Amino acid sequence: MATKSVLLIIGGGIAAYKSLELIRECAKRGIRTRAILTRAGAEFVTPLSVGSLTGEKCYTDLFDLTDEAEMGHIELSRAADLVVVAPATADLLSKPANGVAGDLASTALLATDKPVLFAPAMNVRMWAHPGVQRNVATLKEDGALFVGPNEGDMACGEYGAGRMAEPSEIADAVEAYFAASSDGRLKGRHVVVTAGPTHEPLDPVRYIANRSSGKQGYAIAAALAKLGARVTLVSGPTELPAPAGVDTVRVQTAREMMEATMSALPADAAICCAAVADYRPEIETNQKIKKERGGLSSIPLTENPDILRSISSLDVGRPGLVIGFAAETDDVLCNAEAKRKRKGCDWIIANDVSSGTGTMGGENNSVTVISEAGQESWENMPKARVADRLAAYIADALSKRAT
């Protein structure tokens, strides 16, 4: 990863200030950055600040004789492994989509022979405009990659889709691209991951749920993608952004998660990390249940489908490695081992979610990997590190099974 390089094109929008943090984020990942700053972008950040962070000259002018002699725009556009446009304004999206080149940035976008990753940033109404959406569709058809835009408050005071993805998200997308295009340990493998809670509706305003944040499952999906796997993430309701380089399918209920997970098969491995509700209300009403009428005093429940056991028991199309999670509050290892045998999965990842551990919804996790071969406990660590370690174990296991 240390030898990879990015050509960053900084467009003219308030989000341009985030490009400085993006350069730092890429550096943390060992990715070298060279930058083109548009004339509009220079209204928000300076060539000096960009050049200071990249450690390289910041390029601004197509007709600079010195720049063209030292690093012509053709070479500049092709010397990097990936071109990133952040912020990608409506203007910067329109030019390559329509074959227009009038400055250094747009010329580089047409001259490059490398993939281009756009991080759009604009007003919500601009993003929704049919012309912008046509350009986005054209760029995607031409093979361009996209990260964001996110939904949130705008600098203009409006709210909606149009915020540029955070620098860490863009850097994750860059890293995921490099992982997928390299000879990663899981290249050519397909892994299905479930994550987050499920919401089981009772009436239009109430549902049964749990405290799962989805953080561990999302981290696992991202870690597998970094090793080159094609990852399908089936996610219950969370506030988390979709991991870069991962095909994310969002669902609400256990039945929807079951259907989406089965539809994602076949796969080399399935990791059932989601905290699926065991039960759902037997009857869902389309009107709010009034407590004054005693409607909430007794709620009949019915059992939800068991996704982990269903995958484990497949006669045809069973993944070579099926992994479940066991969130327990007491007798953690004993209950987890019993669950592994009951469900028929290959591994079970046990973790203590009792009061005071901070695991449910927290940033850290302490797990024990349980298989037929025995148990291995890991120290408390950030969920991202748990994910990286588990992804490496999965890669080893699939490699051994293949041989």
Image (cartoon, rainbow, N blue to C red):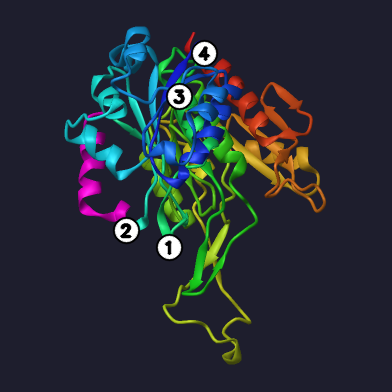
Identify the residue at image location x=42%, y=29%.
267
| Earlier-in-chain disc, 4 versus 1 | 1
- Above or below: residue 144 compared with residue 137: above
Is residue 319 in view from this perspective?
no
Pointer 2 residue: 125
State which region is magenta: 125-143
User: Dot 1 corresponds to which residue?
Assistant: 158
Answer yes or no: do the residues labelled 1 and 2 have beta carbons within 8 Å?
A: yes
Give the mark, 1 or 2, whose residue is nearer the N terminus: 2
* Label 4 Cα neighbours within 10 Å, binned few <14 / some 14-19 / many ≥20: few
Amino acid bearing label 4: Ser
Q: Is mark 2 on a helix, strand or loop?
A: helix
Left or right position of 364 against 104: right
Q: Measuring 18% from the left and 32% from the top, which residue is drawn there?
A: 100
Q: Give the structural element (helix, strand or loop) at label 4.
A: helix
Would you name the residue on which mark 4 appears?
Answer: 399
How far apart, in angstroms, are the residues tagged by discs 1 and 3? 38 Å
Q: Distance between the residues labelled 4 and 1?
A: 50 Å
Q: Decide: few, some or many residues near mark 1? Use Cα within 10 Å; few <14, some 14-19, many ≥20.
A: few
Within 10 Å of disc 2 (Cα), the crowding (few <14, some 14-19, many 20+) is some
Separation of marks 1 and 2 at Cα, in angstroms: 9 Å
Q: Which is nearer the N-term, disc 4 or disc 3?
A: 3
Please state which amino acid type lies under the numbered disc 2: Arg
